[in-house]
Structure formats: C-alpha cells, structure tokens
Image (spheres, rainbow, N blue to C red):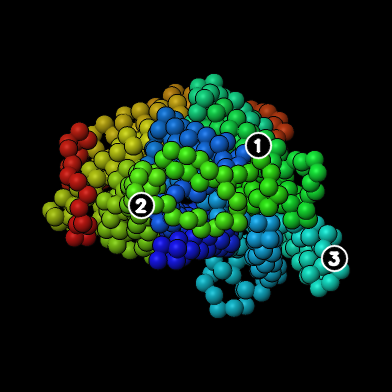
Amino acid sequence: MNQNLARITRKIAFGSLSLAFLLTPIFFLPITTDFFSFQKQTLFLILTSISLISWLIYNLTTRTVRLTLSPMLLPLTLFTIVAIISTHTGDPQPLDAWVGRTSLYLGLTTFYLLFTSLIQSSRQVRQYLNAFLILILILSFWGILSILGVFETLNLPAYLTLKNFSPTGSPLTLITLLLTALPISLILAFKTRTGPNKLKYFLSSGLIISALILVGSQLLSKQPFAPVLLPKLTGWSIAIDTFKSSVLFGAGPSGFLNQFTRFKPLSFNLNQFWNIGFTVSANEYLHLMTTLGLAGILTFGLLIFSWLKLAKRDPGTRITATQLALNAAIITTLILGLLVPYTTPIWIILISFLSLSVGCHKSKNLTKVKDVLLTINAITIIESYNLTPTPRPSKGPSGILPWLIAIPVTLGLTLGILTYSKIYIADYYFAQSLVAANQNQGTNTYNLQIKAINSAPQIDRYHLSYSNTNLALANALASQSDLTDQERQNIAQLIQQAIREARLSTQLNPNKASNWINLANIYRQLVNFAEGADQFSQAAYIRAIQLDPANPSLRLELGGLLYSQDQYDSAIDRFQEAIQLKSDFANAYYNLANAYQQQTKPLEAYQAMQQAVALVPADSPDFTKAQEELEKLESQLPKAPAPADKEPQPTKLIEPSPPPQAPAGFDKINLEEPTPSPSPSPDL
C-alpha cells in the first residue's frame, strides 16, 4: 500500500511540475486587472503547491526525505531569502510585494528543488525540450496569424483580435521566448542524425525564424507595436542612486516605481515617454540592483557562476546534444536579461532550464549532482534511478524528519494560500468594478470596490480608486438641480469618504507619489465644497513633488491651483520651475503667458507665448488657438521679438481651470470631521 501511494504521489508531483513548465507561458484569464502575469503566476504557484503537497506525502510514506543537491540550489535559496528580507525592509507594502515578485521567487525556488529531485535522466530532459518546442511552435503560429490579421475576421472577443495580442502577455515576451527556443531547435536539428526527427527540427526552426521576422519587425523603433522600455542610462542612474540609500537589500521587490519617481534624472524629461511611470527597470540586472540591492545582484550572479561550473565539461565526458541545446538556451536567456526585464514566463523558463540542466548530469554519475536520502541522523547518497526507496521501519527516530518538514511547510503553505486567495478575490472584484465604471454603472462600481477593499484593505490602489469613485458620484449628484436634503447629505457623505480613502492610500504607501497626487487632486476639486481644501491640496502637491522631484507636470498642476486662487506670483514660479525641468514643455509656457497676462505684463506674456507657439506642431488644433493669442499680444507691443527656434513636440495646451462650483445652498464641509467606514452606496 505504501509503495503504491509513494508511486502515485510522485507521479502527481512530477506531473504538476510538468504542467507548470509547459502551461504557464500560454495561460491567461481575463477576470482580474492583469490578464497575464498575475494569472500565469497564480497558475504556476497552484501547480507548484500541488507538487509540494504530493512530495510531502511521498516523504511521509517512504519515511525519508529525498533531495537532489546541485550547485545552484544554495544560490537560488539565498536569492529568495534576500527577496524576503528586502520585502520587509524596503517595500512600503509588503503584502502587495508578497503577492507579486516575492511569491514568484519563493515559488521558483520550490519548483527548482522539486523538479531537480524528481527528474532522473537525460532522456526525460530531451522529452521536455521537445514538449517545449511544441509549445513554442504553437506560440509562433499564433503570432504569425495575429500579425497577419487572421483573427480580426473571426467572431472572438475584441482583445483576441488585436494584432499585438499574444498568450505570453506581450509581443516582446513572445520574441524573448522565440529567441530562447531557437538555439534549442537549431542545435538539435544539426546534431540529430539523418531522419524524420532532423527534418522536424529544421522545420521547427524555420517556423520560429518566420515568427521572429514577422513579429519582431513590428517591434522595431517607430513601428506600431514598438515596446516602451526605460532607457538604459536612466535605469543605471536609478540603480546607483538607490544603492546610496539602500545598498544591501534595495527598495523591495515591488518598489521600483517609487525609486523611479524619486531618482529619475532630468535628462529623462527629454524622452518622448517622459510622462509615463515605469514599474520595471531597463533590463533585469538593473531591476535586481534596484529592488534587491547588492545582496540580490550578488546572489543572482552566484547562481549564474554556479551554473557555469555545472555546465563546464569534466575530463573524460562529452557534452551531449541535449546539454548543448540547454546551455545555449540558458546563455541566450541570460544575455536577453541585459536587454529587457524578465516577465513571469521568462523567469519560469529560466529556472526550468536550470533544473533540466541538473537532470542532464544525473546519468553521468558525477560529484556535481547528488541524490540523497535524509533521515534525522544520516544523509545517504543513492542512485538516481532508485525511484522509490524501501520504507524505513516504523520504530525509532528515522521517520521523524519527514514530519518535522511537513508540519511547518504545511502551515506556511496554508497561510500563504489564504493570503493569496484574499488578494486574488479582491483583484477580481476590483476588475469587475472597472468594467462597471466603463459602462457608467456608478452604484455597481461603488459596491464592487467596497468588496475589493474589504477583501484586501492593505492595498493602496483600491482605496485610491474608491476615493475617485466617491468624488465622481458626488459631482454627479451635485450637478443636478433642486437637490433634496437627503441628496445633500449623500453628497457630503461621498465627499468625506473620498477624502478619507485618498488619505488612507497615502498612509498605506506614503512613498508613492501618485497617491499624494490623487489626494491633491481630490482636495483641488473640493475647494468650493470644503473650507481649507486649497491649503490641503497645496500641501499634498508639495509632498508629491518631494517624492517625484523631476516631474514637471506636478509643478504645472500646483501652478494651476495657485493661478485659480489668484496667487499669480507663486503660480509663475511654479510654471518657471516646470520649464526648468523640461525646456520643451509647451503647456508650461502657455500657462506662464496667461499668468503674466493677469499681472499685466504683455512683454513677458508675449515671450512665453512665442515659446508655446514654437513648440506646438503646426497641424495641432492648439496651434491656431496659441497663434491667435500670440497675435493679440503682439498687437500690444511696439515690435515683436523673433520667434524661438525649437523643434515642435506633440502636446495639448490646457489653461489653468477653476475648481467646480458647489451647488446652491450647499454648506461647506469641515475637513477635520471624522467620517464613517465604507458602506453600501447611498440612494442615488
């Protein structure tokens, strides 16, 4: 009975890992805010957890603990420990980080330990490579059909018909996987003896190359699907500045965005994507330097060094075609890490290849890789083909070790599953709320976001969105005429909740500039609804500027607020600061010209408007508007200066706008008054 149970649990463990390796790259599910990475990671963690549980039962059944010791096991374990420490020392939102890359790193280490312990021969490795090539051929065929627009003619959901859709998550991830698979296919094609298999490998290589050409050509610069990547120099600058403040463990696995806003150089504002916030660095190595610090990049480097020692040919042995193909794929993946950041599928494929590399060495009977049986008082080296060791006698302490491992691992796994499930459910509700908001279902949006917050109250982005939903509902009610007392009360309640939730998001993640920007915008919209809202808004903008000092848009927004309060001197200072941060910021020049006009300074206003006109493209609708205002200013001058020579940049000119007016008879709100907890939507 025990022998049968051991074989069954081992097969389940091995099968779950196989599915994690092969299904994760193509899996997606459109029920959360992230269709791809979050869903792929969830599937990977579920299958790895099933394998871990089966492995624990196998150990309890055989009364031993069977492991494979390999050179990469210790570095990968240290890497994960560094990520866990970094999560709690550097990341302001450890729960969010745990559900993100921290849980992925932990899952990858568990996957590696189990996969290397369960795989037994080079023959199995070859079978996995063939299965991986079949997966890549499916993705290649999908990519070709998608680029050619074949799916546009089919009755499919809209996102499936997009030319840049890929089950991997993005065309860039698809290209990365294709480049990783190509050396496997080519090496096996050239190394395989003449026959049908050789032809199959060559045909596979041809299809992969065709997909690389068709899909890759669309990712080139100025092409429709060109990826938006952080410039390498910017990523390096952010990593070095992070080292100065958090040298050992970095900013935390999910802390890159905060470091980006804090340390991006002024030169980044000359980039066409200057107004985008990046959540990953320019490549994987810079990302690890920023998020996991010196300890993270050193342990990852140690992982690479350990693999190189394993891959080095020993005297008296030869490198097989399978080994050569694996080595080429791993090297390709590591080189690609210098060019792009890794996504979830790339990390899984890399660790899977490292695991398969260990499997190739098991049949060589070398000292680099050892299969061992652990008991409470002994470590025994065994043959890799001895799949089911003889159970130990029931008496004595020999069977204690599996229980000592199984109990804490099971408790930790249970806690992790419960936590992850809450986050997953919360994200499901939040995704549904976004769908409802897109369909203008305000009440449904409100209630779904309350469910998301109740499921995961520590996630700041849910509170941020909920604050905006409250404000939108309040504005919708306030725009109506002949308000009843109940409607006025509902408006006051919604405004109080909007403020409370915006404040709470800044408390949950105080280093995130976007949370303070949201709070500033909330207060700005309430200037005519609440006493002192303008002062609170200015304070929030100042805090956002401290966290994102190189962002010219924040100076522009703060200047607009000051402009609406008739504080023209201060507004001019902020507009000038925006121009100093971004010399081709047309909207800053335009607002500066308006502020000078309010101070009756036509010459300064004219000079600022000249710069705005020079920066706005001639085919833009704003060009005519700015040109007319420039001519009006010119008529007030004896002689117009020559226009500045600046290259036009796409922009949109927006005048500083006043905050919305409160409805007639509305009593202003006391911002310091406490507010109730979230409740189902008021009767709107």
Q: Secondary structure at mark 1?
A: helix
Q: Give whichever of 192, 182 is nearer the camera.
A: 192
Q: Amino acid at mark 3?
A: Arg
CB contact under 8 Å: marks 2 and 3:
no
Residue at 60% in and 66% down: 162
Q: Give whichever of 598, 113 is nearer the camera.
A: 113
Residue 536 appears in which quarter of the rendering? top left
Give the side of residue 302 with respect to residue 252, left or right: right
Dot 3 or dot 1: first in sequence order is: 3
Q: Kindly report which numbered mark, 2 or 3, lies closer to the viewer in this rendering.
A: 2
Q: Amino acid at mark 1?
A: Ser
Instruction: Confirm whether residue 237 shows in the render.
Output: yes
Picture coordinates of residue 324, whole percent (x, y): 77, 51
Residue at 26% in and 40% down: 500
Q: Amino acid at mark 2?
A: Ser
Read off the residue under disc 3.
193
User: Please, which residue is most extreme toward the top here?
Assistant: 244
Give the side of residue 140 with respect to residue 3, left or right: right
Dot 2 or dot 3: first in sequence order is: 3
Picture coordinates of residue 317, whole percent (x, y): 79, 46
Residue at 62% in and 39% down: 71
Read off the residue under disc 1.
306
**Which quarter shows the N terminus?**
bottom left
Picture coordinates of residue 644, whole percent (x, y): 69, 32
Read off the residue under disc 2.
394
